[in-house]
Amino acid sequence: QNSAVPRQTDGGGCALSREDPVFARCVSCAPAFEAMEQVEGQWPERYDVVVCVGTDHQSEGRSFQLLCRTAIQLRLSKALEALCFDCVVTVTSATASAEDLDIDVDGEKVVLRRPNRQTFQPGTLVVEMESEVRVKEETERLQGVYCCREADNFAICTHLEPAFCRNVIPCCDAPHLKAVFQTTVVAPVNSLVVSVTPLKAREPAPRVETDTFRTLGPSESYVFEETAVRIPTYIWGFWAYARAEIVEHGSVLGTPVRTVFMTPQSPQESGDGGSANVKRMTEEKTAECTYAAMWGAFALRFFSEKFRLMPPLQKLDFLPLPGLNGLGMENMATITTRDGYYLVNSKTPYQRRRRVARLLCHEVSHQWYGNFVTPYSFNDLWIKEGMARFLEFVALEAGGEKDLERFNTWNHFLSSVFSEAMAADARPSSHPIVQDHGNNLDAILASFDVITYGKGACLLRMLAYYVGMDAFWIGLNRYVERYQGQCATCDQLWECIQQASDELLKAEDSQKADPPVDLGALMLPWLHQAGFPLLCTELAEDGEAVTISQVPFQLRDLDQAANTDSRSSSVLWPIPIGFRVGRGALQPKRLVIRENSTTVRLDSEAKRGADDVRLFMNTGHRGFFITLYDARSWRAVTTALRSAELTALEVQGLAYDLFFLNSLAKQEQAQSASILPGALLSAATASGERLLEVAHILEKIEADGGQARHALAYVRSVHTCMCQRD
């Protein structure tokens, strides 16, 4: 399974070809192919990079500079007049087959041509370039290469996502252009240098000096193994520490796990006690690595078992740093985090420990989903980040079951991910999950938001529980195994999950199994239109049926005109619904709502009217929609609630529904236009009273010895927020 270098297609590692019919309908791939026209026929296969850490002649060591020698092995599928690379560094020389090349700069591109204007012929070609780059300070945007400082200590660090490898070396800086990397870093003697593969050799290096660069005294070459698979440029990197400590955490399935952290002050700065103080502080920091490393090692084992294969990582390092863009970054086999979200001691509060555990599970999951199998372009950023956000909670729950530390995992998901995603997606400023960035870097950076991460996770959770977690995991296994080391699309993911779901359905009793659902068609509207639906229920007078209708849920600022929202009331979603309904007991059902209005018959042998009906529309609160119950339906919900047939998670979700409906009612009352008919508007207006009713029922259940305390706490917190907004 873990072949050294999987076969790469002309798509630079993408599992599809230009002629594949899936590209005719794959929105995320089409723009990438248009961009590729600039360099069609030029595919990187290998980077051999030598990075020399030094300074210029004027700064006297106060700032740093890199001298980089980059050899790029290209495969040319046709004759080319020029070679084009992404680059924002200064390229001082370029050669190919011992021939000097002309260098032109075009924005963030460097263009190389032969002096006699002859073409580069098809086949394999190695281009060598020398470049210089200034190392940024922490006060600047931490993109590309920057200096991280702590007291008198420092580290030269890289952060290359989404497309900042070009800030370090000339390259083909796009996710689908995957290649093998071999890295050598020349750094001062006694430094500690880390890259995305294990250290292979350490040997003396000659002094390097040019008109604009010099190394920092006696130096050594740190030579690293080449990557076992092709990787995208944004997960490559290196980290050169002046002083650092390595903490060994053993190995997981043969993969060594370590933490590398910047050591405290030098003996000269530590005052009385000197080296004894340094030793004590180092020991304290070493102990603070234990908690996060425990979760990181657990996640590595958990996902290896779930995906049924281990990526060829060769090692797994965790690098807590004082300065970092974001909370963490999933560089291949080398995960960087902010040190405040890695180092844990006895005074670290519960909420921070939970966030640390989530972060480690999130970044480790990327080693499979994002690194080993990579989205074709950042138009599909949501699928790697939404998947990692969902899987971090899956791993968090599993870790609690393994006695690492128990968290209220899915209640926390609702409060920290689900509700925030809904609040953002309800506004006119929201955007579809899949976006055509047009290779605009600012647009790509702006898409690292709550819609991409949060809504993406919510939709995958909705899909996973609709098809069943067994089918979902089998589909993910096939996807990773089939496209390992390559790039793949959303359509290919849906295909793998579809196959797994259909097979499991066929294995069930044919009379009981639900008919197969086209998952690609199901997910398409959710990905390409902003917002989410409001489901309105109307229970028949005799309790024999419930009618479910859908409209787009919209919130506007109160000072906006009612017609400023461009979201059409005719927008529809295919909505997978898990719900429970019955007389005397809730019976689980599921269906997909595709029309404006659907009537569902309630199966029951008893014909006792509507008073004994129990109803709940969103089991586990897994669907990404809000439910508005009419008066009869609400009585059915409270009947189920009094019977203690709703889980704490469902009660929490019900409270969030009422919170959003309360906001909608205020909007509808303040503006002339309404998306709701009068009866349902009245029901929405009663959301505050309904929330209090839920609280009173829970209090009664708790007084009678029920287990309602946890749900009641969420209901009270939501009611407090509602009152504060009033």
Image (spheres, rainbow, N blue to C red):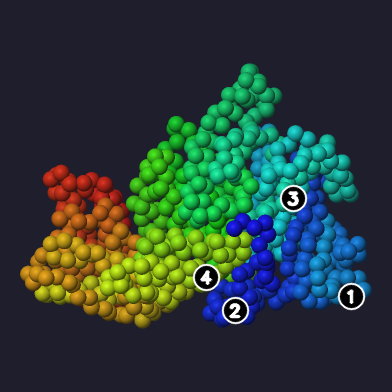
Name the secondary structure under disc 4.
Answer: helix
Relative depth, front residue between 211 and 293: 293
Q: Is residue 363 left or right of residue 699?
A: right
Sequence-wise, the earlier of marks 3 and 4 is: 3
Residue position marked by numbered label 4 in the rendering: 492
**Mark 1 = which residue?**
117
Image quadrant occupied by the C terminus: bottom left
Please state the total of marks drawn on the protein image: 4
Q: Is residue 291 in view?
A: yes
User: Which of these two is toward me, 560 or 686?
Assistant: 686
Task: Work out whether mark 3 precedes mark 1 in sequence or the reverse, and give the earlier one.
Answer: 1
The quadrant in which residue 424 appears is bottom left
> In the rendered structure, which disc, 2 or 1, sits on the residue that comes first in sequence?
2
Can you give x and y, in whole percent of width and height, for residue 514 in the image?
A: 31, 72
Residue at label 3? Answer: 183
Pinpoint residue 194: horizontal percent, then vertical percent: 68, 43
The residue singled out by tag 2 in the image is 20
Q: CA distance from mark 2 to mark 4?
A: 12 Å
Q: Position of residue 150 (x, y in %)?
A: 64, 36
The residue carrying pointer 1 sits among few (fewer than 14), some (14 to 19) or many (20 or more) residues within 10 Å by Cα, namely few
- Snapshot quadrant of residue 180: bottom right
Q: Quadrant of the N terminus?
A: bottom right
Please tell me whether mark 1 or mark 4 is closer to you in this view. Answer: 4
Cβ–Cβ under 8 Å for marks 2 and 1:
no
- Give the structural element (helix, strand or loop) at label 2: loop
Identify the amino acid type marked 3.
Answer: Thr
